[in-house]
Image (tube, rainbow, N blue to C red):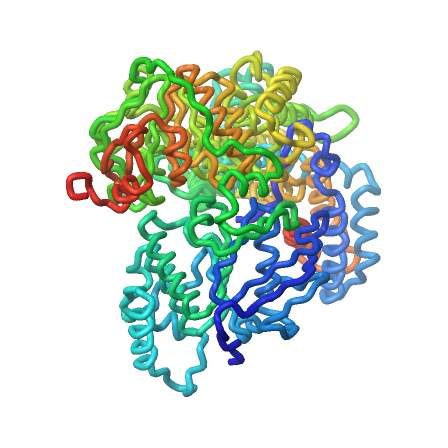
Amino acid sequence: MIVVAPAGKGGMLLEMEGITKQFPGVLANDRVDFDVRSGEVHTLLGENGAGKSTLMKVLYGLYPADAGEIRLRGEPAAIGSPSDAIEHGIGMIHQHFMLVPTLTVAENVALGLPTGSRVRQDLRPVRKRIRELSDAYGLQMDPEAYIWQLAVGERQRVEIMKAIYRDVSLLILDEPTSVLTPSEVDDLFVTLRRMTDDGRGLVFISHKLREVMSLSDRITVLRGGRVTGRTVPDETSREDLAHMMVGREVRLAPSRIEVETGEVRLSMSGLNVAGDRGAPAVIDLDLAVRGGEIVGIAGVSGNGQRELAEALAGLRPVESGKAAMGGADTTDMTPKEIRRLGVSYIPEERMRDGAIGDFSVAENLILVDYDSPPMSRRGFLDFKEIEEGCSDLVERFTVKTPSLDTPTSHLSGGNIQKLIIARELSSDPAVLIASQPTRGVDIGAAEYIHSVLMERRAQGTAILLISEDLDEVIGLSDRIAVMFEGRIMGVLDKEEATVGHLGLLMAGVADDAA
Amino acid sequence: MTAPAPPPAVRSRRWKDRIGSPVNVVGAAAVALVLGAGVIAVAGGNPITAYADIVTGTFGSRSTITLMLGEVTPLLLIGLGLAIAFQGRVWNIGAEGQYLVGAVVGGAFAILSPVQASVVLIPAALLVGTAAGAAWGWIVGKFQAVWGVNEVISSLLLNYVAIFGVAYLVRQPLRDPDYYLPQSKLIPSAARLPDLPFLDVHAGLLIGLIFVPVVIYAMGRTPFGFKVRVLGMNRDAARAAGIDTNRLIVKVMMISGGFAGLAGIAQVLGVESRLNNNLDAGYGFTAIITALLGRMRPLGIVLSSVFIATITVGGDIVQRSQQVPRAAVFVLQALFVIVLLVADKLARR
């Protein structure tokens, strides 16, 4: 292995100069310069499609660049494949982990390493080394544990262990915090700091501004394939960063007005819902949402939020307990019956449950109302009304689309989400169940979606907002319930909710123990 | 199961979607003809003259055209029903059984009916046959809705229940006691479907052609058609939008089965003289190929059923003219579909 030996801190590790990458119809990288010194965290910030991933894929040998030069430690380097990148001491931690669940930690780490013998592999030295490194970096890892036994945060540590074990000098982390609780994020950052203390360089890809501000040494912002800003945390703010990402002023916190809350529109009492494999996913859940109120549900994904939303929408059977909306018992109702009560649902999986990629924009907009006037009359679809109604919705909800006949899959994630929200809000719902309404959506669209939710709140809709984005939950909600392993760990009023407090609840630490 | 994508948009202005990438069909046809030529050559024939014989032989005389249109009729009727099911990604492989049940139940009704006036008997028998096919489809839909039984498996297996059920019925309860052969009494002449003017083809063809615009309209312009296409595109989204997918699948299976049953009873009243084991002619299976080749669109199915019927009639002609087994020609049918499926996959890259 030709490892670029870590030199003194601050030495130039990587220089990418004038990187240009053209895809059909898209200039993904336009003369991008990017560098990493040893011992620093250099954040690459930008919206989806800004060119972050392309740039890193060029660095990792997954795409050839059309123009530009890559130098490692000042020497021009030709990186034609990931194995070249690995030979040069570059590691990458992908959003989706590259681990074999049926193997142990040590076996996963040893995968792909030279074994010395063709016949049998002796894992003892590997295990020993893992223990040493684990202690040195605070990774708390049992080399003999099987991957399938590990939680998501632990699996990520195995990925980091793989990188450290291979002694990478430059590590790329692609959205590493998206699956972690706030305290796991803190732990991760401690580990990452130890790695930079050793003189390694890190590239941190993220769109979470709070984390970017706390971890980065330097920040490079990309928009539309170009560098639109270079800064350091001390000289910038979250608002400035958002501005650089979007290209205009962005309000990160939606303005809120006092709203007189009305009667309870959505209530759950003693609700129990099973998960896909039959195990309890929602346990004895009690919660009520009044008209004009946004109740946020915070929590790390996989703690029963999806099952709860599906049960409320009528898509998943309720095992026991009761759900009521608009005064009616909806526990055993079909999705259609629930919708008739004035309940709208923004599903978490946009392209699975929310919209049909091969359908046109107009067809997706009438997905719910296709069988009632004005969309259809006397048993036939009324295309004139559909066209008028849909044009109106597209305009009102600023869905950017070339035409109503455009296949929905051609739109950006943010515009697809706006389309779904337009459809779900077109009926002036009394109750709105919004699951991850801005996940994977660009900042501009997220800002707009937030303002629309606040508008609905002002108009008296009872909104249940399920989100993994703490800033979003805190910014929008009047009250925040934290879910952990199917239960509500606590409900906080907006005023008492802090990231720290919520983080503890999200990790399953009950209030009386905290 | 993979298949060509159902038509995406109602009234789409995108030319490619309306026509359904004709380049694929033409390209696939060319590749399939070349591959088929190889098969014919191996079987000892001259591919070029064989192809010429298929076309000139089939369209060369009134009698062969009649034969061909006789083949078109069941394929078109069954194919239309399958088009609806397949657009909803409800994979009804049971058309053969639904066809047979429609044929036998409708035929038995015609034989046993106390009223023997054509005005009443013909429509009533057609309705009974259609209802019987729909009921056979209903079973599949219910199995899927209630127990989640995959419709491919249950509809396929119900074919065999129908095939052997018919074999039993014509041997025992429906058997004409005056004959040794396992066959029913003659279909009463009052129940005979009239022939179309100028052609020796029974009115079933006309029924099929009338249903072509009906299906086009129902799928493109009604809430029902919209629902079925949503079902086909994405069942999760359909459910989230409030569509009762289980009920819809049952309906779709009944409609699809109804078309097959109608094809069966039309065949009995138009072509067959008695109910017997020869009813099991495989139209229900060939219609799957027809529907896929016609890209699940009614107009496409008109073309593909003519095409398949031409190969069927032409295959016999080539067998006589070139001593090539007709099976070598029938290989073409399957080749076309397989090549088309591959072409679709490639086009989606």
Q: Image quarter for residue B68?
A: top right
Q: Is residue B316 visible?
A: no
Q: Image quarter for residue A500?
A: top left
Q: Please say if B220 is above or below B31.
A: above
Q: In the current view of this chain or complex, which residue is farthest to the front? A: A235
Residue B227 place in picture, x, y as percent: 52, 27
Residue B203 place in picture, x, y as percent: 67, 26
Q: Is residue A142 left or right of residue A416?
A: left
Name the residue: 64% across, 25% down: B211
Name the residue: 52% across, 24% down: A423
Name the residue: 32% across, 19% down: A290
Q: Image quarter for residue A295?
A: top left
Q: Please say if B191 is above or below A124.
A: above
Q: Is residue B27 left or right of residue A367?
A: right
A395, B106: nearer the viewer = A395
Q: Is residue A384 left or right of residue A207?
A: right
Q: Is residue A350 visible?
A: yes
Q: Please say if A1 is above or below A352.
A: below
Numbered-mark total: 0
Residue A77 place in picture, x, y as percent: 63, 73
A109, A223: nearer the viewer = A223
Q: Please say if B306 is above or below A79.
A: above
Name the residue: 54% across, 33% down: A250
Residue B208 place in picture, x, y as percent: 65, 28
B131, A345: nearer the viewer = A345
The C terminus of chain A - image quarter: top left
Q: Is residue B249 left or right of residue A36?
A: left
Q: In the current view of this chain or complex, which residue is farthest to the left? A: A512
